[in-house]
Structures are given as structure tokens and as C-alpha cells.
Amino acid sequence: MGNTDDFQQILENGISFGRGGERRNPAEGKVKTKAKKKQYITGAHGSGSARQKAKYREQRANRHK
């Protein structure tokens, strides 16, 4: 009759579909990236791939103008 006990517990407490565990600090564990900093966006830091990406970003920004 363990089935009835489970059913009774669900009736009393409800069903929780959320994730369990303790609350985490949202700032904890995030990866800090340089990708959004101005030098990287403009390609000014010297990397060839960054210059190329900056060129593509500029081309995309200038479309439909």
C-alpha cells in the first residue's frame, strides 16, 4: 500500500517540477569574456581574426543603409 502513501503525500504537498538544490549566486561561475569590449569589436588589439570579424561586423552594420 505504498502507492496510497505516495498519492497522499502528493495531495498534501503538491508536485514540484522545478530544479532542486540550494540557490546559487548568479555571479558565481560566470565566464568573463573580452568579446564585447571595444578593442575586440573594432579589431584594434592586433589579432588578424579579430580584424576580419570586425570587418564583417562593419559590413553587416552597413547593410540596408
Image (cartoon, rainbow, N blue to C red):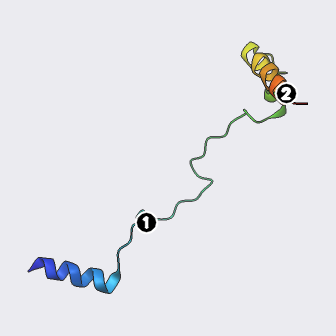
Looking at the image, which residue sits at the far top? Answer: 48
Q: Which residue appears at 23% of the width and 85% of the height?
A: 8
| Label drawn at residue 45 | none
Image quadrant assignment for residue 51: top right
Residue 16 at x, y = what percent? 38, 71
Q: Residue furthest front?
A: 64
Look at mark 1 in the image and give the residue it sits on.
18
Q: Is residue 30 above or below residue 6?
A: above
Residue at image position (81%, 19%) is: 55
Left or right: 48 in relation to 65 = left
Q: Nearer the viewer, residue 50 or 30?
A: 50
User: Is 23 rendered above or below residue 54?
Assistant: below
Report the quarter where the C terminus lies.
top right
What kind of element bears circle 2? loop
Q: Residue at x 22, y 80 (%)?
A: 7
* 14 left or right of 46 in image: left
Asked if 4 appears above or below 25 in the picture, the reply is: below
Label placed on residue 63:
2
Name the secondary structure under disc 1: loop
Where is residue 25 shown, x and y percent of the image? 58, 59
Label 2 is placed on what type of residue?
Answer: Arg
Separation of residues labelled 2 and 1 (CA atoms):
44 Å
